[in-house]
Image: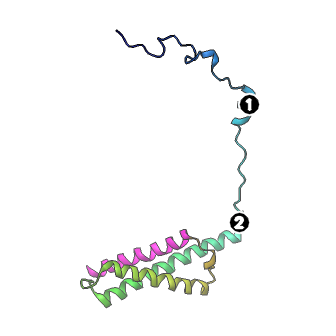
Amino acid sequence: MSKKTQRSKGSKSTETKPTELMEIPTEGAAESAEIPEKKSFIKEMSPEEKQKAHRDGIIKTIVAALLGIVAGFIVFYQYGAGEDRIWYALLTIVFVLTYYLQRLIYPQLQIDTKAFKFKDWFYVEFIVLDFFLVTWTLLLN
C-alpha cells in the first residue's frame, strides 16, 4: 500500500513536457534587452559658476563652523558643565537658533538660501552641532 504521487497516477494533463514550455522569440528578446538612453537633466556649469559654487561652499562651511564655536563658548560660560540642565535641550536650542541665524546671515553674504535643499541644511547644521559639541567638550576638560 504505497501512496501514489501526481506523476505516478499517469495523468497527462498535469505533466509538462519540455517541448511544451513557452518559447521566447529571439528577435523580440534582443530588442527588449536594449536599455533606452537615460536623459540627463544635469545642467552643465560654466567655469565661473563652478568657482562661485565652490566659494559659496567654503563660506557656508566657515560660517557654520564659527557659529558652532561661538555657541560652544556661550553655553560653557552660561551653563558650565550643564549638570543642572538637560543636555539635549541645550543641543536643540543651539540647533534652532543657529538655523535661524544662518537664514539671516547667508543672504548678507550673497548666498541664496532659497536654493538650499534638505541636504544643504543638514550639512551646515551638522557642522554647527559638531563644532559646538567639540568646543564645549574641550572647554569642559
Depth check: give the residue in front, 31 or 42: 31
Q: Which residues are magenta?
A: 118-141
Give the quarter of the image for residue 48: bottom right
Amino acid tagged 1: Gly
In this image, 41 relative to 2: left or right? Answer: right
Mark 2 neighbour class, 10 Å CA radius: few under 14, some 14 to 19, many 20 or more: few
- Image coordinates for residue 2, horizontal then vertical, percent: 36, 10
Give the secondary structure at mark 2: loop
Most extreme residue toward the bottom, as rendered? Answer: 78
Amino acid tagged 2: Met
Give the residue number, with chain letter if any, for mark 1: 28
Prevailing secondary structure of the magenta residues: helix
In this image, 65 relative to 43: left or right? Answer: left
Residue at left 71%, top 63%?
43
Queried whether the magenta region covers residue 127, the answer comes back as yes
- Image coordinates for residue 54, horizontal then vertical, percent: 61, 71
- Image coordinates for residue 130, horizontal then vertical, percent: 40, 73
Queried whether the magenta region covers residue 101, the answer comes back as no
Residue at left 51%, top 81%?
63
Mark 1 and mark 2 in contact (Cβ < 8 Å)? no
- Image coordinates for residue 126, horizontal then vertical, percent: 45, 72
Most extreme residue toward the front, as rendered? Answer: 1
Could you give the CA–CA distance between mark 2 and mark 1, rounded to whole angstroms?
A: 41 Å
Residue at left 66%, top 68%?
50
Give the quarter of the image for residue 109: bottom right
Query: In this rendering, which labeled residue sits more in front, label 2 or label 1?
Result: 1
**Looking at the picture, does residue 16 appear above or below residue 118?**
above
Give the secondary structure at mark 1: helix
Most extreme residue toward the top, as rendered? Answer: 1
Give the residue number, with chain letter if any, for mark 2: 45
